[in-house]
Amino acid sequence: MKKSESSNLESNVKVKRGFNFYWRFKASPQSSRDRKKVEGIVQAKTSIVAVSKIKKMGFSRPQVRIDIEQSIRSGFGWLPSNDFDLRDKARLYETLSRRLQRDGSLVSALESAQEYLSDGRLKASVAILASQVNDGQPLHKAMVDSGFPIRDSMVVKGLSESGQSYQAFHDLSVESKARHQREQALSAAMRMPIAMLTAVYFALPAFFLGLGPRIATFFKRLGSQNTNIPDSIKTIYAAVDWVNLNIPAATLLWLSMGFASVILWKSSLWTSLSMRIKAFRDLAFKAEHASIWSVYGLMYSAGIPAQDICLVLRPTARLPQTSDALRRMSRRLAAGGDDREAIQAAGFPKFVVTGYRAARDSGALGEGLKSFTLMLNEDIEQLTAQTKAWLQIFSLVIMAMTVLGVFYIVYYPIAGPILKSL
């Protein structure tokens, strides 16, 4: 693969971050046979840029309006998603696979899919895809233009050339289901601590605007001779007074705390911090590589060059170590190196090197990587159960600290002098 082709491929699959809005549009397709307007979604900084993008897709007379809900979900471009809802996508791909296997109409399957899809972005992309396929665009190119992941389109292109489009969508459906199950297991493990931290976050306004002022007034009426308030508690009630005197500024500060927490959760900084904990580190590595090598196997079976696969998968890696290893492996393969030597020198974990070599020695790398991924999924189930147990303990610690904090702030100033006098 030439250097220019390599750089173009890498730039196409890179997830772009930056301030952007989502824009919903209605536009007319190129085909004169179909006068029905297509509804879709594009991401752009302004309506002018959105209109330009829509016209580049081959549509005319677009009407655009901002989609506030999708814009907020993406953090106005700073929290972009590189994929759709996996459960919806798996359902769509399985439907397309069955329809193509029966020699059915792909366009009619795409049009009917919009009735059962719940992901708004996916539904809009399917509408664009149906229109472009109806206009004669190649399926894999239409998938990229309508917002589907480029790795999915490459699998479809590779297997379509051998007349196995239905198999491509079936394999992608299976992979999406497995990835959805992994993500569900991980989110289930994090559900309780997130719920506890969210409860504490929303309890702050209730304390500072409701309970706090009443307790401060009570202490003032009680008199300093009847209470012995520590300096730390005085600081907290001074903050209560400041919040009630500066409600707009306090509200902005509270909202900023919530937004900053979401940014931290999605950022590489949180990944770096969580990787210091062995349970999180083991689970993160296994989940990452289960996703990476399942897709690698699909793309390899579709006849895609290994160095191209590494370039496509690199932006999807959540861990910097995995991204760097894929980059090094791609460069060695592009230079003509053997894949077994390339994966050894790339810096992947030992279990990945061992699993890849076993898959290669089996004589069918795609099937071998599928078996390797299944074993990783079994490990993930065990690690998830262990991590969930630790997170439940962490949630109880948060609850206990919250209760002790409330007791210290509310009851200790009254109970402290009484306890000292006993």
Image (cartoon, helix red, strand yellow):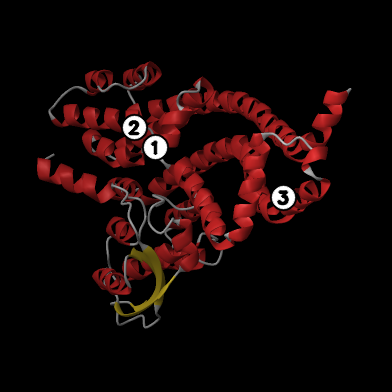
Percent across and percent down for residue 313 are: 32, 39
- Residue extending farthest to the right is 422
Q: Identify the residue at image location x=40%, y=46%.
A: 167
Q: Residues within 10 Å of mark 3 (few under 14, many from 20)?
A: many
Mark 2 = which residue? Answer: 320
- The x and y percentages for residue 203 are 68, 49
Residue type (three-letter) at the residue carrying disc 2: Pro
Query: Is 149 located above or below residue 318 in the figure?
Result: below
Sequence-wise, which precedes: disc 3 or disc 2? 3
Task: Name the amino acid type tagged 1.
Answer: Ser
Q: CA distance from mark 1 to mark 3?
A: 36 Å
**Disc 3 on helix, strand or loop?**
helix
Are there few (<14), some (14-19), or many (20+) residues within 10 Å of tag 2?
some
- Rendered position, 329 above or below 165: above
Residue 408 position, x and y percent, is 74, 34
- For label 1, the SS is helix
Residue 56 image-quadrant placement = bottom left
Label 3–label 2 contact, CB within 8 A: no
Residue 105 seen in render: no
- Mark 2 and 1 residues: CB-CB less than 8 Å, in contact? yes
Q: Secondary structure at mark 2?
A: helix
Residue hosting label 1: 268
